[in-house]
Amino acid sequence: MDDLMTVVDWSRWQFALTAIYHWLFVPLTLGLSLIVAVMESLYLKTKSEKWLAATKFWMTLFGINFAIGVATGIILEFEFGTNWSNYSWFVGDIFGAPLAIEGLLAFFMEATFVAVMFFGWGKVSPRFHLASTWLTWLGASISALWILVANAWMQYPVGMEFDPGQMRNVMDNFWALFSGIAVNKYMHAVFSGWALSGVFVIGVSAWFLYKKRNVPFAVRSIKVGGWIGLIGLLLTMWTGDGSAVEVTKHQPMKLAAMEGLYRGGYSQGIVAAGLVNPDKTWNNDEDEYLFDITVPYGLSILAKHDLNAFVPGISDIVEGIDVNENGDTINTVSYAERIKLGKLSHEALREYDLARARNDRAAMDAAEQKLREYYPYFGYGYFDSVDEAIPPVGVTFYSFRVMVILGSYFLLFFVVALFLVYKKDWLQRMKWLQIVAMVSVPFMWICSEAGWMVAEVGRQPWTVQDLLPTKAAISEISSASVITTFWLFALIFTVLLVAEVSIMMRQIGKNSTKNLEIDNSH
Amino acid sequence: MTLEYLQNYWWVLISVLGGILVFLLFVQGGQSMLFCTKYDKERDLIINSMGRKWELTFTTLVTFGGAFFASFPLFYSTSFGGAYWLWILILFSFIVQAVSYEYRRKAGNVYGTTTYDVFLFINGCVGCILLGVAVSMFFFGAYFTVSRGNLLDPGSPVISQWASTHGFEAIFNWKNLILGVAVLFLARMQACLYMMNNIADDPSFFNRLKSRALIDGGIFVVFFLWFLAMVLTATGYTVSHNNDYTVVVSETPFKYFHNYVNLWWAGLTLLLGVVLVLFGLLKTCFSKHWTKGIWFTGIGTFLAVVSLFWVAGFGDTPFYPSLLDSASSLTIRNASSSEFTLKAMSYVSIIIPFVLAYIAYVWRSMDKKKLTPGELETTSHKY
């Protein structure tokens, strides 16, 4: 096969590129659809044209964003086949189901009712139109559910067993897909979309305040966007905490990488700010950080909700050192051992295959028994050294801090924005705050993308945790093909993003010169 | 429900999704005509008529892919990873379509309306032709091998291996292109019939659509019959399965003809489909004001497509024949998901009638009033 690692690396870059672009648009769809639905509900309740104008304005921006979200989304689904074909076979029996259900349950709902949302004014009754807007939001949220269930399953593969005859995993428990990781991940992602949309609405509305145009419209929008954003952010933080606990249980290496922690301990502190030492490896004596500001007990609380809990570091995990429920130090399976056991599982599968070819039932049973014993380490069998099984620490560490620091900032942002918007005209008068609100908007996207960087870079090198590393998940294609398509995708996505941002800006600018305040309320 | 029953059930569902997708390709057909319009107003009408349905076609394509992944993952793995360039080009054409309707008229769209119209045109032509190519491979095969044991080769662990041209060989295979061209002209014909039903404008536009439907329909019929003749006279594979997921293959002359004879219900479905398409087309062309042709050709198209899927997959036929190693051919038995997954998915599939019902309801509600040039001047959301 054409240089394996080049194909692997470019395939990873291509998938990462698509996912990063896709996530620029999805959270806004998730949150803005809710904000629009709330505004339209208020319109129907009050019969005030002011709410209708607000609904239509935000709906236009929703439409611009929705189209490009759809465009980038289709690629993600098909890239599982085009670039990760081995993965598609190895776990397709489990992973394919959520994707198909997403299409049937969510996409059709979204696609059908979004058309009513845009073109149904005057063609269907106001109540039917409102129902369509809510169903568009519901469709988007259900769509996210299935995608995130699928993603969570890759991080915590459950509800399946390995079928040595077909050399793939098959599902044996559908409901197991809704694990703690899946539930937390879903809520964390969706609520973060609400928060992001809240920041977007406040930022855009701040522009209207800054230009002193359509001020009541802007104030109304800030109230709706601010509350939805604040609720979304608080729930994001709550589910983020839940996610940390789940990660500690099922992906301790990811947690250690998030913290840049090599040697863990009891009552482990968390690094609030710091620089990781790039020369540090799991088996040398370099310092972990070039500098750090540590909050005592922080990591123990985050990981296990216990001040004194033991949290293992990267070296501990690699060496198989952990602590049991009684607080005693125990030896788990070291990574060197896992690699050995993984190779034994490969050998057992090979024996099984040969025995099957000979139709030797006894040998098949013996090989299968051995395989079942070693199968939890199957993926490690693809590694030649322990280093291959450790995620990139720097990117994970910094992304985590970017997410948390910006997330905390946005909590303050929402509280201040809501406080001031209800205090007479304070927000209208404070120009500098309006500028801060506008400048803050792109940082919310950085915060959101950083969250995904933590989740996806931190779980490397696995496509399916412990079972299938990225290098065994790929398609048999040439590196030249993947490099070409990577740049094609990069070009087309960038071209479309430029158009999207430009259209958004023009729509906002155009509407800031229109009068959105004609009130025909009855 | 036995595994065999579930596999058959899912192949039928895949064929239903395929049939719906080909019907909905009228959106692409309309896009392929954008540069054949006489006036700008016509182009606006075409785009706004198609633009209210493009999401359904797009969604059906995504669901078709997802359902194939869930029910026949070995096909998904082999075809998508192997015919890389074929699928990537299809995807590219759909990426640029997705934004074009929304952005083409918007102020600040950077590249100008014509650029987005070119994107729509590309999707209209390339999307149809290449989807036709992809389906044609179900009959004329592809250059791949499947060896599950590769999973244990750390240097090259991929189980499906494809010819080094990775899909280009399929695109430039004239047999595949014949179906591609047939699908394009079918989509164009359907687009004309749909617009005759959906748009109320002056009679000259209506009459132009009618003549174009006849021309496109005529070209479609020629290419479709050519494709059908090739399929019916082709030598195909007949398979029997070993316990170890491999197949024993024998070559059978006139395989698909025999399938149509043996699976008489598939033959009848094809016949009914062809009759409905011809009836819808001819009645439209020989009537003065008849606008319901799209429903006849639409149902006819759906029936013809499902029957093609049936003879491709049933009757001990591999639906994805391998031209490199016939034993690697994919069948609905060796490429499917497990019994558990198919059963779980089958429970979910119970909602399909409900989904179809609300789509039909919304379609009817939205299309009650025909699209007029006047509406385009007053609507708040115009493409």
Image (tube, rainbow, N blue to C red):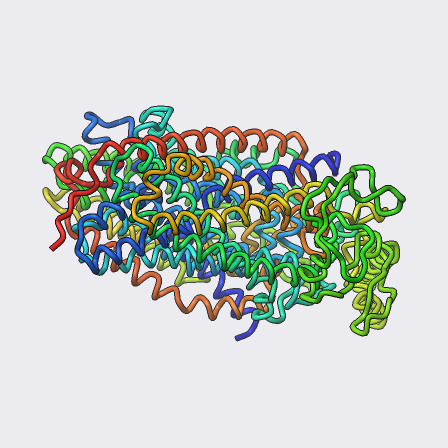
- Answer whether residue B30 is visible to the viewer in this image: yes
Write the residue at 29% across / 50% down: B298
> What percent of the width, then of the height, locates residue A501?
41, 33
Closest to the observer, B183 or A15? A15
- Answer whether residue B223 is visible to the viewer in this image: no
> What percent of the width, then of the height, locates residue B332?
56, 59
Q: In the image, A324: left or right of B54?
A: right
Q: Quadrant of residue B246?
A: bottom right
Closest to the observer, B2 or B107? B107
> What percent of the width, then of the height, locates residue B303?
35, 55
Write the residue at 28% across / 40% down: B189
Q: Is residue B72 above or below residue B114?
A: below
Q: Quadrant of residue B98?
A: top left
> What percent of the width, then of the height, locates residue B331?
58, 57
The quadrant of the image that shows the C terminus of chain B is: top left
User: How many marks are shown on the rendered structure?
Assistant: 0
Q: In the image, A464: left or right of A151?
A: right
